[in-house]
Amino acid sequence: MKFFLISDNIDTLMGLRLVGIEGVVVHERREFLEMLESKMKDEQYAIILLTTKLIEMCPDIISELKLKQTKPLLVEIPDRHGQSKIGETIDRYVSEAIGVKL
């Protein structure tokens, strides 16, 4: 099983290529969703890494996939700009899943 990166910037892609992770750079919502759908159907990928900026393009779709899909695992990674609020995102997912605000 392999990792795959879908990134919005070349810096993240180049950094992860250094450790052997394949990936692509996309900039438009449609392009991102098509690539994500394609890679989710590919059985060789167990984990798909997504940059924060791409997730912010369509948070409703990504959170739905994270809650319902068992495979592959979708993981948000912050990019070099570091404006990620992953903790708040996790709180929101848990709150939606169990119905209790944390």
Image: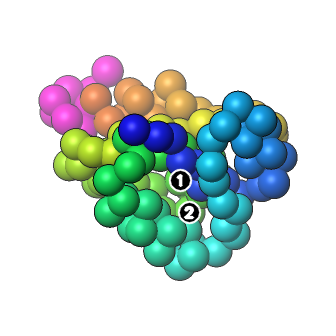
How packed mark 1 is, by other alpha carbons closer than 10 Å (few <14, some 14-19, many 20 or more), is many
* Side of 3 relative to 97 (left or right): right
The quadrant where residue 61 appears:
bottom left
Q: Give the residue drawn at x 27%, y 31%.
A: 95
Query: Which stretch appears magenta?
Result: 95-102
Residue position marked by numbered label 2 in the rendering: 57
Helix, strand or loop status at disc 1? helix
- Name the residue type under label 2: Met
Quadrant (top left/top right/bottom left/bottom right) for the C terminus = top left
| Residue shown at the point (39%, 38%) measured from the top left | 1
The answer to whether 102 appears left or right of 86 in the picture is left
Q: Closest to the observer: 75 or 3? A: 3
Percent of width and height locating residue 48? 47, 46
The circle on residue 73 is none
Q: Secondary structure at mark 2?
A: helix
Outermost residue, top side: 102
CA distance for labels 1 and 2:
5 Å
The residue that disc 1 covers is: 55
Q: Position of residue 96 (x, y in %)?
A: 24, 38
Residue pictured at 16% horizontal, 29% vertical: 98
Inspect the magenta stretch and tell me whether residue 97 lies in it: yes
Residue pictured at 80% horizontal, 45% vertical: 14
Residue contact between numbered discs 1 and 2, judged by CB atoms under 8 Å: yes
Residue 68 is situated, as x and y percent measured from the top left of the image, at 20, 49
Q: Is residue 60 visible?
A: no
